[in-house]
Amino acid sequence: MRRAFSPRDFLDLATQISKAVATREELYVTNIEEAWIRTGISRAYYAAFLYVRRLLGLSRYKKADVHQRVIKRLKVEGGGYKYIGHRLSMLRSMRNKADYDLPPAYVSTLRDLERAVKLSTEIMNRARRLRWPPRSTGAL
């Protein structure tokens, strides 16, 4: 049985990553497995989000509502853009849980991480096949 996740696990993970990069040692999943899973979910979201944000030409937009803005912009475009917007919204919800919800309200699993990676991959693959930027001005 795994022990309960603690926010401190993120700091422990960051420390392990820092040491591994500094010494060029391999990283291993240790007793902070859930921190790795939560970090992976978060990184899967940011991979898709940053990719789509750049395609929309919003890379310089830094306001707090940037996540909502990107998703809303995609959804109002319709078609494949709307589909990507819905998928990105789902992935963002997963990321928010992974980043902000503690046990017992949320316990992340390898299945959650695998789903996040699959969604991120799908978003980026579908986005690659669309015309960017979308035709409408999508002024939001």
Image (cartoon, helix red, strand yellow):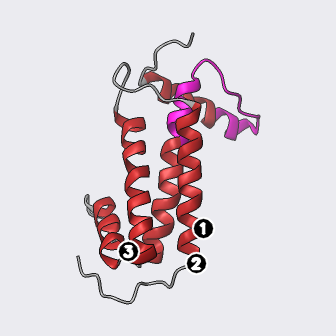
Numbered range of the magenta stretch:
19-40
> How far from the left and from the top, in percent, is residue 43?
52, 48
- Is 3 in the magenta? no
Q: Tell me the quadrant of the picture where the N terminus can be found.
A: top right
Numbered disc 2: secondary structure? loop
> How far from the left and from the top, in percent, is residue 114?
59, 42
* Mark identifier at residue 129: 2
Q: Residues within 10 Å of mark 2 (few under 14, many from 20)?
A: few
Residue at the image point whose x is 45% and y is 61% from the top: 49
Q: Is residue 103 visible?
A: yes
Report the amino acid beneath label 3.
Leu
> How far from the left and from the top, in percent, is residue 87?
44, 58
Residue at the image point whose x is 48% and y is 29% from the top: 108
Q: Tell me the quadrant of the picture where the C terminus can be found.
A: bottom left
Q: Is residue 22 left or right of residue 118?
A: right
Residue on which the image places disc 1? 125
Report the amino acid beneath label 1.
Asn
Numbered disc 1: secondary structure? helix
